[in-house]
Image (spheres, grey):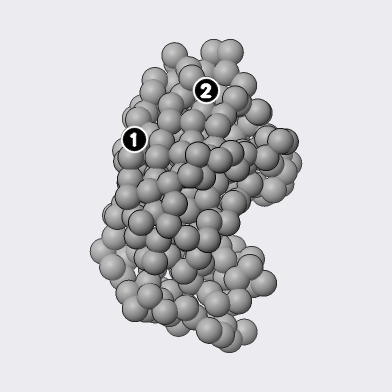
Amino acid sequence: MTGSTLPAKLLDARRQHRLIDTLAPADIPADAPTAYAIQHEALRETDARIGAWKIGARAPDALATGAPIDAALVHASPARLPFDSFFRVLVELELAFRFSHALMPRSDPYTRDEVFAAIGGMAVALEVVDSRFAQWPNLDPLAQLADSQNNGALIVSGMEPYEVIAPGFDFLAPRLEFTLDGMSIAPEALGNPAGDPRELLVWLVNHCSRMELAVEPFWTITTGSYTGAYRVEGPAMVHGSIDRVGELELVLS
């Protein structure tokens, strides 16, 4: 237990669908390990099961961050969700991965080669970015990290075999389409700020290992946006596809 009141406030915000108006300095996590501990404390309080992770980095050489996602917030495409179930809706198009087998905690770090060899599947993912804080995005990054790194929901296409898709695939700037009610919302310049998103998987596996968590093969791991975040102002249909990987659809009703 962290001793912080933030996990309870985050849970109340979700249950009552009421934003956290103010954040006292004492509620801001002191460091990243505390923020990660708060993520898991909030999950334990609701007996939630981890169904996915979101991970990302601001640059290829920047420190990665991530957050577990409650399995109840992971939806197979096509999905329909109430627009008003979120505080705000921003959408991002991403690549997601699954491992072919569990990667157990151990004392020695997993190597890049070991992690890449364990990748089993690839999918298209759409993250709904949301926050439980009224002052978002003008908020301490550690508080955002504690709040599931601003995750609201995750929509996932069918999972395709990694060994089939990966050869020749452009992980830096794949061909994609991203539309809102049939109109393109994809920016002209595409790219994941972390570079090749598979590199983030190495961080995640070792992050979980340090926390004594097994990386499960049923976890869907989404790895940062190729499109940036697009604000959706009301009910709409969002469609996304990544060449050779798949497509998905989210109706916000």
**Front position in the image: 98 or 182:** 182
Query: Which amino acid, by three-letter code, is at mark 1?
Result: Pro
Mark positioned earlier in the residue sequence (2 or 1): 1
**Front position in the image: 125 or 181:** 181
Q: Residue at x 34, y 39 (%)?
A: 77
Which of the two marks, 2 or 1, is nearer to us in this view? Answer: 2
Q: Tell me where residue 137 appears, x and y as whole percent.
A: 63, 68
Q: Tell me where residue 169 appears, x and y as whole percent.
A: 57, 18
- Quarter of the picture containing the C terminus is bottom left
Mark 2–mark 1 CB contact (< 8 Å): no
Disc 2 on helix, strand or loop? Answer: loop
Disc 1 on helix, strand or loop? Answer: loop
User: Which residue in the structure is indicated by mark 2?
Assistant: 243
User: Which residue in the structure is indicated by mark 1?
Assistant: 217
The image shows residue 190, relative to residue 92, as above or below, that is: above
Real-space Cα separation, disc 2 to disc 1, in angstroms? 24 Å
